[in-house]
Image (cartoon, helix red, strand yellow):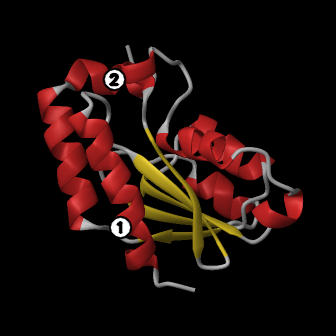
């Protein structure tokens, strides 16, 4: 299986795509047996969606998969997954999550760990910079994305 940093490159590319589209720069990749099955990025702004975060967009792009595929999967995401995305990871019983960074936002990592999910945090400088720049530039949009008033 590729090392987590190599896998993260797919999610970072998606985060940059989201940023370039005027959205929230968060990306994700679903990897099974070393192969990237799907990628996605936060498209809430672009699609006027309430639920298209990076991880959920990635799962949507993957389409319907048998439980046996999810059981071998790794969700790679540029940012610590929010409660909604954490729930999706748990629902599909994805056993491993690789997170680019959790400095700008701490999601449901403890819940994932408590349910037996292997959580790897890379503390990646590119991911941190993407989010810090976005939060400074678009604080209102960021608060909307994470459900803050």
Residue 119: image x %, image y %? 57, 68
Left/right of residue 99 with respect to residue 108 in the rendered view:
left
Q: Nearer the viewer, mark 2 or mark 1?
A: 1
Residue ID for mark 2 = 143
Q: Secondary structure at mark 2?
A: helix
Residue 44: image quadrant is: top left
Please identify the quadrant where the N terminus is shown. bottom right
Q: Is residue 22 above or below residue 31?
A: above
Q: Quadrant of the C terminus?
A: top left
Q: Position of residue 125 (x, y in %)?
A: 21, 65
Q: Residue 108 versus residue 138: which sits nearer the camera?
A: 138
Identify the residue shown where x is 42% and y is 36%: 42
Q: Quadrant of residue 57?
A: top right
Q: Which residue is mark 1?
A: 9
* Alpha-carbon span between mark 2 and mark 1: 26 Å
Q: Residue at x 32, y 34 (%)?
A: 24
Residue 90 appears anywhere in the view: yes
Q: Earlier in the sequence, mark 2 or mark 1?
A: 1
Residue 16 in picture, x, y percent from top left: 26, 47
Q: 5 left or right of 137?
A: right
Q: In the picture shown, does residue 114 fall above or below 81?
A: below
**Above or below: residue 85 compared with residue 120:** above
Mark 2 Cα-neighbour bin, 10 Å: few <14, some 14–19, many ≥20: few
């Amino acid at each position: 299986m590729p090392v987590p940093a190599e896998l993260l490159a797919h999610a970072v590319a998606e985060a940059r795509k989201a940023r370039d589209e005027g959205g929230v720069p968060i990306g994700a990749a679903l990897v099974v047996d070393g192969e990237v099955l799907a990628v996605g990025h936060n498209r809430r702004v672009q699609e006027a969606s309430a639920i298209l975060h990076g991880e959920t967009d990635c799962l949507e792009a993957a389409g319907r998969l048998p439980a046996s595929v999810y059981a071998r999967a790794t969700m790679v995401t540029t940012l610590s997954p929010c409660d909604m995305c954490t729930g999706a990871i748990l629902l599909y019983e994805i056993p491993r999550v690789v997170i680019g960074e959790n400095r700008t936002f701490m999601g449901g990592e403890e819940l994932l760990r408590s349910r037996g999910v292997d959580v790897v945090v890379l503390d990646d400088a590119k991911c941190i910079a993407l989010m810090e720049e976005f939060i400074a530039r678009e604080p209102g949009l960021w608060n909307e994305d994470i459900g803050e008033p």
